[in-house]
Structure formats: structure tokens, C-alpha cells
Image (spheres, helix red, strand yellow):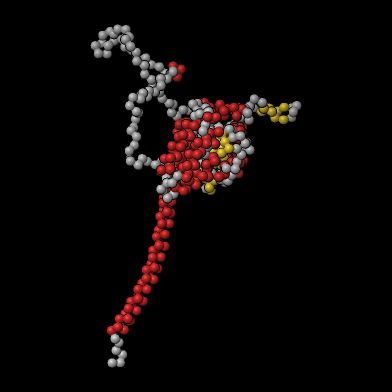
Amino acid sequence: MRGHLSTEIRLQISVTRLKSSVERYRLKIKEQDLLLKEKDRKIKELEAKLVDKESQRKELLSYLYKPGKKDGQSLPRGKKPGAPAYHRPIPPDSAVTQEYTYTVRKCPICKGGVGDIVDTVVKYTEDIVLKPHPLVTKHTITRHWCSNCETYVKSPDVPPITRIGRNAMGYILYARYRLRLPMKKIQESLSDLYDFKISEGEIVDTLKDAETLFGKDYSAIIVLIQEAKAVYADETGWRMDGRNWWLWVFATTTGTQYVIEDTRGKGVPERMLGNKEDRVIISDGYAAYQNLPGDKQQCWVHLLRVAKLHSPALYGDLVVLYKKLLLELEKPIPKRNREQLKKEFTLLIEKKYSEPTVEKVKGRMKRHMPFLFTCLDHDGVLPENNTAERAIRPQVVMRKIFGGSRSLAGAKAHQVNSSVIETLRKQNPDANFFDVMLPLLEKRRSEL
């Protein structure tokens, strides 16, 4: 019969079709495998980015917030068992302004006579004067006509007379830079406590007058920082008339200098620190300090903070090495084993860790390694930058309270007044603020 195919031919045709289908599906499977591998690769990349972003988020939070304990437990309140109790110190007799004696001649119960004094109990009440009267000084200056000179003359003994007195200026400085009060709150406190009326503009003018008085002291602080053997440096953001500026701090054990500039560039520390060669600059690793004259010391605390976020295992090893470094600093310089510590530090860089972002920490370790052990070659140089961090913290708090400065003149007054007050606090840590500030104001006013 025409057109009739045999069974063998039909089977061959079926086999051919099946082979074609198999080949077609094999190609599709290969395409799917390639697509699957590409998706797996992208997933791994995204997972690595996620881990990196998470570590960055934790690192940022570590700067902004104080982390709590993971187990939810807190330290017990109160003193440790066996610790001595706190008692308010007994005022000296010279501080007593009023004195009362309570005695009896008859028994308050039976009304009979009583014997001699058996014992005596002395108690003290300490208080403050609220809303004292302001001190107002009236100055009368007479002028006279001199016929010989043909001019008006007055007494040469007339002192510099200002609208705001020394005590009021001292309180305004205290309220602004120690209590960190906004202008409005300073105005209210003067009105409530002292019945002293003053406008916000007068407060601003008083702060600028203080800047003028402290000009000589600020110049002395600049020289102090430039001549110091060790300078701790840091910087933070600052707002000036709604724009982003920078507040720099340069601190030593005896002085603190604040500088407010519109840049975070290296020109600021170059200008403020000068060209002294035999000194050490301690910083958090910011590149602006790297090419300045003198030796460099990088902060171990910043390195440990980054390591803790990216690799807890590496963090633990670095903590052990850091404790060894602190023990070495207690020894005289000739006995300090710098090479052994550097060798152990190098071994940590070469050691394998399982965390995926540990290379970021190791990269920082390699870059900063030449500057992490400089403290071993000098006396009195710390391996961390907490001195500058503590000096800059009050400025950060003030920035959060009243937002920075409104004008360039206000920023200059802030940097001068803050520097002088913080330096006086360092040089007189146990002294009362007014016992130090008021004599200085009186002295500077007499020099005008």
C-alpha cells in the first residue's frame, strides 16, 4: 500500500525525534545551570554586602549610642558590701554664719530641776541664699575746664567702667560653658535667682567682651599646644549660621585649644600645631594628621572598636595584645620590648579568621601598624586618644543643646572662651570655678 511505513521506519523516526528533544532539553538544562550559578554568585555578593552594611550600622550606632548588656542584666545599685558610708563633711567654724544653743534648766516632763550637762549633740543646717539683691555701683565722674590746656579734663584714676559687672560676667561664662545653657535660659536664671534683668543681646555682647579680655590667655594656650611634647587631636561637626563647619580640639595634660573652621582639611592642624619636630601627635587615624611634623600615635581604642564589630575573635586577640602593651608602658623606655609586640601584631594580621569582613580590620591594622607602637619610645604618651575625646565631648553636648553658633563672631568668641575655661579647669582641677575665673577677669580688666 502506497504511503505505508514499516514499523522499523516508524521507530527510527520516533528515535530521531526523541534524540532531538533530548538534545534540546540538554541545552536548556545547561542554560538553566549557568543562570542558577549566576544567581548564586549574585546572592553571595548581596549577602556579603548585607554583612558589611550591618557591621557599618553597628559601628555607627557604637558612636551614637551606648550599647546595653546583651543578657539584660545591670549592675547592682548602691555601694559594694563593706564599702564605707558617705557622710557630708562637717563645715568648719569659719563657715558658720548663725549659731543657736538649745539647753534646759527644768525637766520638760516633770518640771523638776536637771543636773549638769551629760553630753552634747551638734547638728548643722547648710543652705543657700536665693534671689539675693543685685549689686549696683554708681560712678560719678566730674569734668573740669583747664584754662592752661584749653580742654576738659577728668580724674586719671577712673577705672574701666562696663555696664555688666565682673560677677555677672563670671556667672554668664559659668552658665554658658559649664552648665551649657542657651541664651534664653541664662536670661531666665539671672532674673529668677538674682532679680537681674538682662537681654539676650547683652549676654552675647558679654561673651564677646570676655573674648577680648581672654585674648592674651588664648595666645598663651596656642603657644602651649605648639610647644607640647604630646598633643591629642580630634574634630567633630559644628553648625555655624545653619551651615556645616568643624570644631577641632588640640589637648595636652595642661591645656585645651578649640578651633572652629569651615573645613576639615589638613591646613587647620598645620596652622595650629606649627613645625615642631620633637613631639608626638595622638589621633584616631584621620589622614589630616599623618604628614605633620613629629611622630604619630594611632588610637588603639578605635582599632579595638572596629575589630569588635567585624571579628569578635580578632578583637579578643587584640585585647590581649593591648594589655601587654599597657604593661610595657609601665617599664622604663630602655626595657620596653617593642619588637616582640610588633611581631605578635604581625602574626595576628596573618592569622585566619572565619568572619567575612575581617579583612577590613586587617587592612586598618596594616595601614596603622607603623603608628600603633610609637608610645613605647616616649614617656607620658598614651596609646589611645581618649584625652581629646573627653575634651571634645562637652562641645558635642553644647552643639546638641543650642545648635552651634549663629555668626562668625559668635564662633570666635566660643572657641576663645571655651579654650580658656577648659584650660583653667585642667590647671586647677579641684578649685571652685568662680575662685579662679573672677580674679582672672579682674586682672584682665585692670590691664585695659
Q: Is residue 336 left or right of residue 4?
A: right
Q: Residue at x 43, y 28 (%)?
A: 130
- Seen from the viewer's position, the closer of residues 408 and 286 is 286
For residue 33, what is the image quadrant?
A: bottom left
Q: Residue at x 31, y 84 (%)?
A: 9
- Seen from the viewer's position, the closer of residues 428 and 267 is 267
Q: Is residue 212 left or right of residue 284?
A: right
Image vertical order of residue 238 relative to residue 228, above or below: below
Image vertical order of residue 61 relative to residue 177, above or below: below
Q: Position of residue 128 (x, y in %)?
A: 43, 26
For residue 159, what is the image quadrant?
A: top right
Q: Quadrant of the N terminus?
A: bottom left
Q: Residue at x 48, y 40 (%)?
A: 345
Q: Position of residue 280 (x, y in %)?
A: 57, 36
How many numbered dots are placed on residues in this image? 0
Q: Quadrant of the C terminus?
A: top right
The answer to whether any part of residue 54 appears in the image is: yes
Which residue reaches farthest bottom?
1
Q: Position of residue 142 (x, y in %)?
A: 64, 27
The answer to whether any part of residue 203 appears in the image is: no
